Image (cartoon, rainbow, N blue to C red):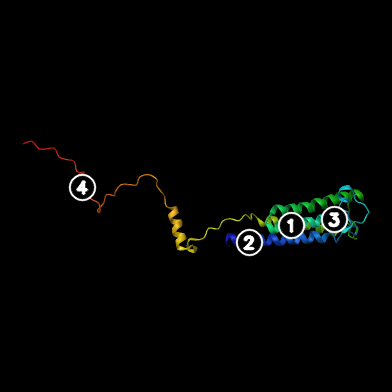
Amino acid sequence: MLPSTASKARYAVGTVLVLVGAVAVVWSVWRPWYNGRDGRYYQLGDVFDGISNTRAQLFGSLFLAMAAAAFLALLGILRRSRLLVVLAGLLVLFITGLWMFRQGQAVDGLKVNTDGTGLDVGAANAVIGAALMLIGAGVWGNQRRRRAIPHPEQEAPDQLAARRRSALPTSTGPGPGPRQGADTPADTPADRPQEPPRAA
């Protein structure tokens, strides 16, 4: 498999994981988080101030944080930015972890029961969705675009000739003298030293 093909395959798999994670994160607020209470009924401010029994409006609930994280993930896919996707996943984990801390304070310790009370599937969906985002960003690998170098057989003849000429070494000094060989006489009469006159 060619490197470019493998990179595209990794990006496709990572993108699917990030999308599934974003959907799971948003869908989690319509699922029960604790004792049958849906995530959209928890006020976002309660995560920082303490859990209350006040029923939140949709855009003032945990939905706002999860929707923001999903938007960051989608923006990261469009820009091929691992940083944005990682930030989205970390935002979900931060909000969910802080909620668990505040919920544990409100009920004197979190519980997980088989009868549907305690921690429920909504919180699990949020954690799983965030994990999928982070895994998808890791599967992407390095998505920096590299300049493709065409194969010599795929280049046009003039481009190939120009590239070969540019690869030849150049010299700024004086060129070599005439090559002594069969085509060039070793010396000429003008180049021969004059003989001294002979004594009579």
Q: Nearer the viewer, mark 1 or mark 2?
A: 1
Of residues 75 and 112, the one nearer the viewer is 75
Q: Tell me the amino acid under the disc marked 2.
A: Lys
Q: Residue at 79% of width from left, 55% of height from top?
A: 68
Q: Earlier in the sequence, mark 3 or mark 2?
A: 2
Q: Tell me the amino acid under the disc marked 4.
A: Thr
Q: Which mark is residue 188?
A: 4
Locate residue 46, reporting x and y percent.
88, 50
Q: Residues within 10 Å of mark 4 (few under 14, many from 20)?
A: few
Q: Earlier in the sequence, mark 4 or mark 2?
A: 2
Of residues 50 and 67, the one nearer the viewer is 67
Q: Nearer the viewer, mark 3 or mark 4?
A: 4
Q: Which SS class for mark 2?
A: helix
Q: Earlier in the sequence, mark 3 or mark 4?
A: 3
- The CA span between labels 3 and 4 is 99 Å
Q: Nearer the viewer, mark 3 or mark 2?
A: 3
Q: Are marks 4 and 2 in contact (CB under 8 Å)?
A: no
Q: Nearer the viewer, mark 4 or mark 2?
A: 4
Q: Earlier in the sequence, mark 4 or mark 1?
A: 1
Q: Which mark is residue 15?
A: none
Q: Earlier in the sequence, mark 1 or mark 2?
A: 2
Q: Which residue is mark 2?
A: 8
Q: Residue at 72% of width from left, 60% of height from top?
A: 17
